Amino acid sequence: MDVFVKIMAFIAATVVQGTPLLFGAVGEIITEKSGNLNLGIPGIMYIGGISGIIGGYLYEHFCAEPIPILCVIISLLASLVGSAFIAFIYSFLTITLKANQNVVGLALTTLGVGLGNFYGGSLLKFFGEDGSISLYITGNAYKTKIPFLSDHLGIFGETFFSFGFLVYLAIFIAILSQWIINRTRVGLNLRAIGENPATADAAGINVSLYKYVATCVGGAIAGLGGLYFVMDYTTGAWTNNGFGDRGWLAIAIVIFALWKPRSAILSSYIFGGLYIASVFISGLSGSTKELIKMLPYLVTIIVLVFTSSRKKREHQPPAALGQSYFREER
């Protein structure tokens, strides 16, 4: 029985760890389907987190009696706007100005991490307060469980229905994204642009518009991963550099999931489980724990080598990924 309980606890922890990875991975998949390679996802997740913190803090600070649902709505909107704005900057630099996508993405990661840590450590000082940010009301609102299912289904309910709404929203967004990409005209046009923007342009598709929208929407979704971490995982508290390497793991999951949002669901939870496996295995030395933490990256490399050797087109990234589109060269 103790083993079963421990397994269920591990599954629940895996979901918690995998959810921010799922948001980041799905956001990057949508971006890459348009041919843009956004390595700024780690920074965007920081911006999404700190934007939500700022929105929630301002509401709690200036409202005498904060309403939990408004705490959620305001912080959620702030996160979406903040992360989408950073993605818009990336879009302007790479789509309009044709800047190198790798360089811009890495620069935005540095910018996002720096801004997040700066405002996370200085926000209270702007209002003459001391200490660290802790949004108790907002954080607990995000952690609200599904009442009936979590309380009346025993350990099964506690394991699968005891999470905040962002966990289920991440799964829904992944499934919806898969459907849009594969079953709609918008998804067909998006895939065409990622494969051959010149041909898509000749067919009358607005290449720049699709790239802008896909990158900004993808950035907004990735930002929700940062919001989940600060609001649900840490209950409204900010910790500098608290995200660790989760943003890079999200990018690795894109490869592991073969650029399919639906596959990113399972992939994210596998990576989430590998990320914390060392915590649930007793008796490990420090070096062994670090080796186990390396497994997600090792698995990604193995999958990349395997899929590349098979040379199946459906297992490859969009053909025009990372390449700027110059219409005059069409």
Image: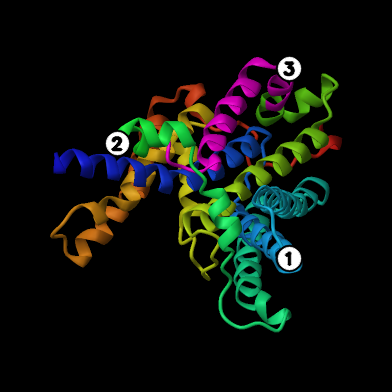
Tell me whether the residue at label 1 lies in contact with that at label 3, contact meaning CB atoms closer than 8 angstroms.
Answer: no
SS type, badge 1: loop
* Residue 185's disc number: 3
Q: Is residue 239 above or below residue 260?
A: below
User: Gap in Å between the C-alphas at discs 1 and 3?
Assistant: 48 Å
Q: Is residue 278 above or below residue 325?
A: below
Horizontal placement of 82 versus 117: left or right? right
Residue that appears at 67% across and 54% down: 71
Instruction: Look at mark 1 in the image and give the residue it sits on.
Output: 64
Percent coordinates x, y for residue 72 in the rendering: 65, 50
Q: What residue is shown at x 65% (from left), y 34% (from top)? A: 320
For residue 94: magenta? no
Q: CA distance from mark 2 to mark 3?
A: 43 Å
**Is there a contact, CB below 8 Å, between mark 2 and mark 3?**
no
The residue stretch that appears in magenta:
161-190
- As drawn, 314 above or below 94: above
Q: Earlier in the sequence, mark 1 or mark 2?
A: 1
In the rendered structure, find residue 155 and report the number of the disc placed on it.
Answer: 2
- Give me the residue at 66% from left, 57% from top: 52
Question: Is the residue marked by circle 2 packed among few (<14), some (14-19), or many (20+) residues within 10 Å?
Answer: some
Q: Which of labels 1 and 2 is toward the front? A: 1
Q: What residue type is disc 3 on?
A: Arg
Q: Nearer the viewer, residue 9 or 179?
A: 9
Residue 159 at what x, y percent from top left?
35, 38
Q: Is residue 246 visible?
A: yes
Residue 260 in sight: no
Q: In the figure, is residue 245 to the left or right of 152? A: right
* Callout 3: SS: helix
- Chief secondary structure of the magenta portion: helix
